[in-house]
Amino acid sequence: MKPEDYSERTVDVDGWQVRLICYQLDGQYRCTADNVSPGANLARVTAETKEAAESQALAIATEKLGRTKRHAV
């Protein structure tokens, strides 16, 4: 099996940089969202369409990052 329709982009979610990596494998789209700076995985999603996978991964990442406290430096 070889991934197809690979895409990678960085979006801003509540002041955090989030990288979305999406690709098609075995007829399903898989999307991973991670926090760019430390590279911590926030979400892994499998869906029928690329748009659905991206939106689900972004929703999970937004919810998790919304619970993260920021401390003044």
Image: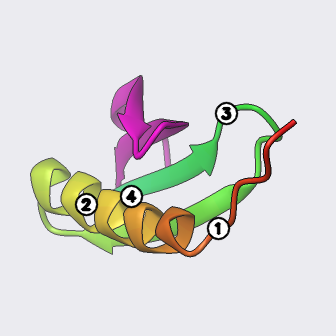
Q: On the image, which quarter does residue 49 sit in?
A: bottom left
Residue depicted at 39% across the width and 44% down the height: 13
Pick whichever of labels 2 and 4 is earlier in the sequence. 4
Whether residue 51 is in magenta: the answer is no
Identity, as a three-letter code, of the amino acid under mark 1:
Thr
Q: Amino acid at mark 3?
A: Val
Of residues 11 and 54, the one nearer the viewer is: 11
In-image side of 38 versus 50 (left or right):
right
Q: Which residue is mark 4?
A: 30
The answer to whether residue 26 is seen in the rendering is no
Q: Which residue is the site of mark 3?
A: 36
In the foreground, 4 or 52: 52
Q: Nearer the viewer, mark 1 or mark 4?
A: 1
Query: What residue does disc 2 label?
Result: 53
Mark 2 vs mark 1: which is more N-terminal? 2
Q: Residues within 10 Å of mark 4 (few under 14, many from 20)?
A: many
Residue at image point 60% right, 63% down: 42
Give yes or no for residue 16 being in the magenta stretch. yes
Q: CA distance from mark 1 to mark 4?
A: 25 Å
Q: CA distance from mark 3 to mark 1?
A: 15 Å
Q: Earlier in the sequence, mark 3 or mark 1?
A: 3
The colour mode here is rainbow
Q: CA distance from mark 3 to mark 2?
A: 19 Å
Residue depicted at x 68% and y 58%: 41
